[in-house]
Image: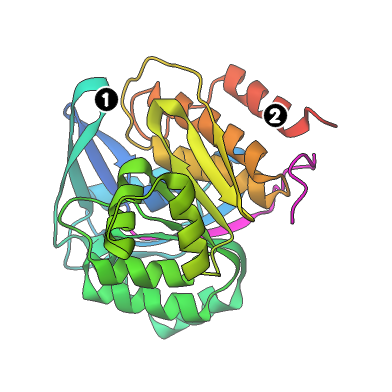
């Protein structure tokens, strides 16, 4: 079991591979770089990691812009495939009260066909990753499910991070069950936890009980994170369930806040800190992003200073 209060230096050569959608969120008429795997990679890069994204974009202006912006943010674009036939993905985002987004996700786009060739699969399998990250949405296409299945069997990674990230109309029970079987770190929000509880156990269990039941059924899962919006988050490891509170903020929009949480948690946890510390960093980063428009805002000097203090406060 990890020392939950251990202070160590963050790992600046941490290697992460994210798989899935890369797109533009259209929010109030403005295009913001988006897609959970790309958002996650961008935040990991800002924190000091070396992330790569496996996705696909169209041979169009949006695709060129996405590649350029991803490179500027420090994301390795070597595994971003170019699709000759399909356009770069876009999502229309309508913001409701408290910045809660409603997504209209266009289909038949480039990231629906993430199909590396043999050379690219070999290159991916030859790498040693600290974490491989995937979600549910990209599994909506058969091509992507085949690719993900092969990656999960061939990729060499210390951890497999599954962000449930359900989008209405774009998930199936069998995809979720398969993902749970392969992951070592599981992340979901309260609503997703309730859906999974009903799906697997026929009733809505409290988060604490659900975590125990999930780790009993899926022994590969060593850590579970459940985000709770303005209330903060819960983390579960080795039978210990903890809730960490968030500082109240004025929300601009919550698009990408969950991805920032994931990045903060993974970077801190994989640097050797315990789950409590990792969740504290994750909540700080997630609430910061929720207070700014767009999914990957610039980090303020104040935020950078706070992050540094959290990592080194016990040294």
Q: Residue at x 21, y 22 (%)?
A: 97
Residue 14 painted magenta: yes
Mark with earlier residue (1, 2): 1
Q: Position of 11 compared to 17: left or right?
A: right
Q: Which residue is mark 2?
A: 310
Q: Using residue 142 as the reference point, say whether residue 75 is left or right of it.
A: right
Residue 116 makes an appearance in the image: no
Query: For the residues marked 1 and 2, what is the alpha-carbon distance in whole angstroms?
Result: 28 Å
State the image coordinates of residue 103 (x, y, percent, origin top left).
18, 42
> Above or below — where is 276 with respect to 238?
above
**Mark 1: which secondary structure?**
helix
Task: Report the number of discs.
Answer: 2
The residue sitting at 41% across, 40% down in the picture is: 258
Q: What residue do we see at 33% from left, 62% from top?
A: 201
Can residue 173 be seen in the rendering of this structure?
Answer: yes
Q: Nearer the viewer, residue 79 or 288?
A: 288
Q: Quadrant of residue 227?
A: top left
Q: Pinpoint residue 180: horizontal percent, then vertical percent.
A: 42, 66
- Examine the image and state in which quarter residue 171 appears: bottom left
Q: Quadrant of the N terminus?
A: bottom right
Residue 90: percent from the left, percent from the top?
A: 20, 47
For this view, does 280 lie left or right of residue 67? right
Q: Magenta span covers which residues?
A: 1-21
Q: Is residue 209 above or below residue 315?
A: below
* Colour setting: rainbow
Give the prevailing secondary structure in the magenta stretch.
loop
Q: Nearer the viewer, residue 261 or 230?
A: 230
Which residue is disc 1 drawn over?
99
> Where's the C terminus, which quadrant?
top right
């Amino acid at each position: 079991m990890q020392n939950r209060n251990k202070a160590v230096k963050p790992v600046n050569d941490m290697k992460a591979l994210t798989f899935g959608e890369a797109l533009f969120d259209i929010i109030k008429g403005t295009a913001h770089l988006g897609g959970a795997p790309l958002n996650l990679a961008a935040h990991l890069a800002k924190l000091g990691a070396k992330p790569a994204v496996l996705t696909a974009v169209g041979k169009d202006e949006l695709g060129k812009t996405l590649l350029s912006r991803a490179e500027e943010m420090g994301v390795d674009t070597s595994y971003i495939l170019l699709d000759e036939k399909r356009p770069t993905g876009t999502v229309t985002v309508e913001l409701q009260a408290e910045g809660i987004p409603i997504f209209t996700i266009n289909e038949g786009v480039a990231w629906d066909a993430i199909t590396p060739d043999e050379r690219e699969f070999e290159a991916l399998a030859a790498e040693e990753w600290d974490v491989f990250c995937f979600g549910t949405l990209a599994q909506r296409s058969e091509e992507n499910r085949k690719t993900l299945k092969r990656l999960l069997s061939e990729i060499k990674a210390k951890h497999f991070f599954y962000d449930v990230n359900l989008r209405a109309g774009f998930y199936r029970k069998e995809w979720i069950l398969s993902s749970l079987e392969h992951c070592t770190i599981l992340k979901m929000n309260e609503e997703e936890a309730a859906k999974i509880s009903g799906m697997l156990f026929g009733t809505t269990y409290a988060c604490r009980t659900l975590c125990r039941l999930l780790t009993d059924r899926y022994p590969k899962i060593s850590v579970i994170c459940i985000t709770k919006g303005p209330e903060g988050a819960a983390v579960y490891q080795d039978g210990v369930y903890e809730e960490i509170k968030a500082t109240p903020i004025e929300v601009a929009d919550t698009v990408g806040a969950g991805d920032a949480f994931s990045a903060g948690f993974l970077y801190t946890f994989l640097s050797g800190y315990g789950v409590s510390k990792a969740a504290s960093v994750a909540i700080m980063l997630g609430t910061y992003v929720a207070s700014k428009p767009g999914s990957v805002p610039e980090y303020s000097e104040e935020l950078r200073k706070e992050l540094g203090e959290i990592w080194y406060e016990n040294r």
